[in-house]
Amino acid sequence: MYIQSSADDEKYEVIKNVFTSTLTDHGFTVYASAKPRTANTPDSAAVEPQRQPFRLEIRALEFAIRYPRIFRSFLIGGKKVERDASVAISATLTNLDNDSVIWVKEVKRSYHDQFSFQMLSQVENDLFTFTKPEKKATNWSKIVEPVVVSGIIVGLIYLFFSNQSND
């Protein structure tokens, strides 16, 4: 079987590796090229010289990792990171002998987790840029503004009632 991706970037390399591993675990032989291999092909030492009758075409419709929220559980304390991952992949299995489509499937999966901010360097992989999504800076105005407004209102109410006379 030959696996073909719709683009050549790091996301597709990861997807192709997962497909290759899964197919190999299920007893399929996966090749890097759909062209027939011969004894003259340099990388064909351990490969049988035969034409592969099937091609699995994969297309990543969605492949994203993002951090929707970096926050503290309490006003003081350790930071936490929420992570959302989503993937949608379309796969088509084609018979190369007669160019007929045998099987088509689209799969969507998502994953949500939370971890300590200190583990961020261990979670992000330096080899792949898609594992390092944009991090939004913590905005203290979300906490400070309500506290200041509440303080001003409480102060004005105190002043109003303290200036009332008992006449």
Image (cartoon, helix red, strand yellow):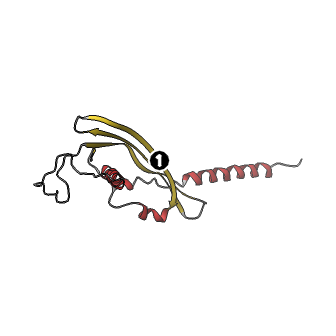
What residue is at 76 percent from the left and 48 percent from the top? 160
Most extreme residue toward the right is 167
Residue position for label 1: 110
Residue 6 visible in the displayed image: no
On the rendered structure, is 145 left or right of 86? Answer: right
Percent across and percent down for residue 119 are 46, 64
Residue at position x 49%, y 62% in the image? 117
Looking at this view, is 142 or 6 the one in front? 6
Which residue type does callout 1 highlight? Answer: Ser
User: On the rendered structure, is 151 left or right of 85?
Assistant: right
Q: Residue at x 30, y 35 (%)?
A: 101
Q: Residues within 10 Å of mark 1 (few under 14, many from 20)?
A: few
Q: Residue furthest left?
A: 40
Relative to 30, 108 lies left or right: right
Q: Position of residue 17 (x, y in %)?
A: 32, 54
**What x and y, as percent, mark residue 45?**
16, 59
Q: Closest to the observer: 99 or 17?
A: 99
- Residue 75, position as x, y percentages in the image: 60, 60
The residue lying toward the viewer, choosing from 158 and 117, is 117
- The number of discs equals 1
From what the image shows, is residue 73 above or below residue 92?
Answer: below
Q: For numbered disc 1, what is the local secondary structure?
A: strand
Whether residue 72 can be seen here: yes
Q: Is residue 59 left or right of residue 166?
A: left
